[in-house]
């Protein structure tokens, strides 16, 4: 059960990493529609990984309570940790690309609003 849970989490993290890599590529190429198409899938994967993490902790705790030496899962857990760390780093890389673009758009909107007396749209009668 524990090995299956770890395997599922690794598979989910691989799918999520691929999706984030595609996001980085699409941001670089200004393909924003593709980003939006993947958002729901990525959110679901993140929620699944988070829930699986809690379940894995519960399973490991139950094994410990049953007197099982959980070190037998050490290699699998270490592999999962590597994938999750890579996922974290990729997400950070995406953020360093997206946040400056977000700030640029905010600055443009602020400037337009300032020039139009606090409104984005200037209405002339």
Image (cartoon, rainbow, N blue to C red):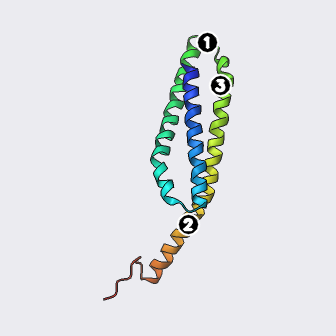
Near-viewer residue (7 or 112): 7
**How many tags in the picture?**
3
Q: Mark 1 points at which residue?
A: 68
Q: In this view, does 64 lie to the left or right of 123?
A: right
Q: Picture coordinates of residue 91 (x, y %)?
A: 60, 48
Q: Picture coordinates of residue 110 (x, y %)?
A: 49, 74
Point out which mark residue 50 bears.
none
Residue 74 placement: quadrant: top right
Q: Mark 3 points at which residue?
A: 76
| Within-10-Å neighbours for mark 2: few <14, some 14–19, many 20+ | few
Residue located farthest toward the left when viewing the structure as drawn:
125
Indicate whether 61 appears above or below 34.
above
Q: How far apart are marks 2 and 3 (CA)?
A: 40 Å
Q: Name the residue under label 2.
A: 103
Query: From the viewer's perspective, is the residue at label 2 or at label 3 nearer?
Result: 3
Q: Which residue is drawn at 61% across and 55% down?
A: 25
Near-viewer residue (52 or 61): 52
Q: Distance between the residues labelled 2 and 1?
A: 52 Å
Q: Picture coordinates of residue 97 (x, y %)?
A: 62, 59
Q: Residue at x 58, y 37 (%)?
A: 13
């Amino acid at each position: 059960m524990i090995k299956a849970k770890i395997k599922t989490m690794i598979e989910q993290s691989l799918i999520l990493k691929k999706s984030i890599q595609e996001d980085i590529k699409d941001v670089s190429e200004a393909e924003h529609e593709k980003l939006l198409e993947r958002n729901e899938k990525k959110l679901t994967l993140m929620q699944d990984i988070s829930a699986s993490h809690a379940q894995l902790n519960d399973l490991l705790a139950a094994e410990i309570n049953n007197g099982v030496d959980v070190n037998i899962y050490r290699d699998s857990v270490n592999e999962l940790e590597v994938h999750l760390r890579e996922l974290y780093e990729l997400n950070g890389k995406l953020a360093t690309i997206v946040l400056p673009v977000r700030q640029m758009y905010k600055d443009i909107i602020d400037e337009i609003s300032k020039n139009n007396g606090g409104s984005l749209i200037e209405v002339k009668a």
